[in-house]
Amino acid sequence: MTTVLQFVVDALTAGSFYALFALGIALIFGIMQLVNFAHGELIMVGAYTIFLTQAWPWQATLLMAVVAVAVMALLMERAAFRPIRGANPATLLITSFAVSFLLQNVAQMIFTTLPKSADVVPLFRSSVTVGGLTVGWLSVVTILATAVLLVALALFMTRTRAGVQMRAAAEDFEMARLCGVRSNRVIASAFAIGGLLAGVGAILLVGQTGGISLGIGLTPVLFGFTAAAIGGLGSLPGAVVGGYVLGVATALLQQLLPYELAGYRDAFLFAGVFALMALRPGGLFRVAALSPRV
Amino acid sequence: MTTSTRPWLRAGVLAAVLCALVALATLLGTLGGPRLDRATGIALIMLIVVVGLKIFVGDSGIFSFGHVAFMGVGAYTTAIVMMAPAQRAFQLPELPGFLADLELSAFEAALLSGVVAAVFALLVSLPLMRLSGLTASLATVALLITCHSVLQNADRFTRGSGGLILIVEPPALLTLLVCACVTIVAALAFRQSRIGLRLAASREDEVAARAIGVRVWWERGIAFVVSAFVLGVAGSLFVRYVGSINPDSFFLSLTFTAIAMLVVGGLTSVSGAVIGTIVVSVALEVLRVIESGVTIGGLEIPSRSGLASVGLALVLLGVLLLRPAGITGGRELSELVPRRSRRAEQRPAEPDARTGPPPVPVGAVEE
């Protein structure tokens, strides 16, 4: 029983992580067909902000991290993605690849390649034991924070004017513009929300490992866009489901793989993703607006 | 184009011009001492990589982020089969018996590397060619990560993240130059072949191409396997040239450099691949010199690691934003010079409009 519960907690924690990153990626993809590889560097910006401000009270540090990431996301949109809006998805993807490479190397020039460490919230390192089950506070915080953010995002998307406009833009960008949706504003808000999610993700990530390096965003972004692709790129519920599916898959592989194959976990995972894409190219939740029209 | 031999003739002339260009660049590269010699060698290998990448990406219109994996497969194959048995016993003691006492020549190893990469690509292409557009590109990312992870963990064959060291005579610059020229000729011939033309048609309009009998997956699959073969050979040359490899050698950084070269030049033409490689290689070398700290006109620029990569990213971003179809606009050099065709003589009023097929609108929205 404890093993099962432990498994559930592990899967939920990993799934929440992936869902956070996948949502940020899916949100932007849905509106402008951009697979934002530089989402990983947003996480990196968040992590280094935490490093720079770790002397502050922890509430201020965390707030600063989220704000810095959101600002960075807006800058990125303005400088690199706005000028080539509407280009084909491959060109957009290459551009985001270039932005990612740029930011990572600028960070290398400033912070060098030596890893840094930061201990933000000491609570994250402790754990609580309930009836034989040991759960890290970080897991609790990750699961709860993600749940809160998901509910907030869902309310925002369905209940507010900006959210409805955003969904309309994802459905049919041209049509939405004709109906009076301002493209610059809606895309900028999508980037801001994506940045917010990445900022929270960065906090949780640094809380988990305590280490900060240039490549800190790589694994999350890869898992994030894998989750988004599993769910069906561009679909927000798809991204969340994809995130949790990926979380369960990682936890399962972790449990079931024999020791000598454990290192291959990610190989199995991504080979599975490759197979899933081949069998169901649109992902679990196919987005009608994205399938080619003849 | 008529059914004459003229397209082939034009391709032949183009091949000669491009090879001469590469030879000239190589010659200039050999004038600056050992450091520049090495950069020239790497640039020639990158040329093979980029032209090989163009065979699939440029003609099919599907962006692949996974091709560097084929280069990795080729490089590891060569490293394993060319290593001296004593070295092998030391680096890879658990290698299966039939590989343990193998010692192939450089040529055999290059060929084998190409074939292994091509067979691997064939297996991958069976599911991959079902996909189109962005999904296919993302699947190639999954492929790259999978291969990287396998290379890191298959200790028995790859010595994990420690990598392999291969001490052999590195290929001479002339050999690399010849290989690069052969690749250029092969890429142009492929583009001019029946399959290449059908593939290019499917890139322009997949639905229309299907309607006139192009199978698409078949043409794409062939191009994928051919370009994987080229990348496998490039990997073989690479490991012999640099002497040591690890899984990170064939991951995002190299992928990024190759993509930057192809996109900067213009990804739908061989001329673009060649010019992009030359331009980016030169830019990278200049940036590396600055990176290691120089004094320009009394102004001292301190050494800053990462500067070269920042410069490369800025170059790529600049090209993407200002000239998305690349320096050549995706056209071959031969299409840039006015053609003396009968049509042109009849319509002297608009000579430029007849100089070749319209440039591929890389920046166009896919509907």
Image (tube, rainbow, N blue to C red):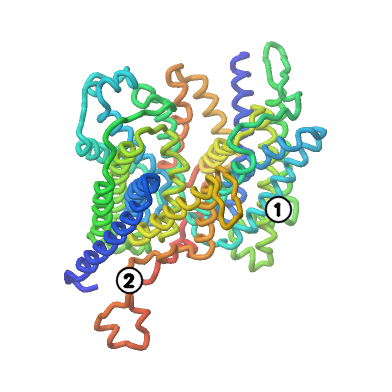
Disc 1 marks a residue whose amino acid type is Gly
Q: How many marks do you count on the picture?
A: 2
Q: Which marked residue is nearer to the observer: mark 2 or mark 1?
A: 2
Secondary structure of the residue carrying numbered label 2: helix
Q: Position of residue A11 (x, y in %)?
A: 59, 26
Above or below residue B22? Residue B148 is: above
Q: Position of residue A198 (x, y in %)?
A: 66, 42
Secondary structure of the residue carrying numbered label 1: helix
Disc 2 marks a residue whose amino acid type is Glu
Compare residues A191 and A161 and report the one nearer the observer. A191
Indicate which disc residue B51 carries. Answer: none
Asked whether, in this view, residue B244 is left or right of residue A161, the answer is left
The residue that disc 1 covers is A163
Asked whether, in this view, residue B254 is left or right of residue A189, the answer is left
- Residue situated furthest right in the rendering: A57
Output the chain of dot 2: B
Q: Quadrant of residue B188?
A: bottom left
Above or below residue B343? Residue A57 is: above
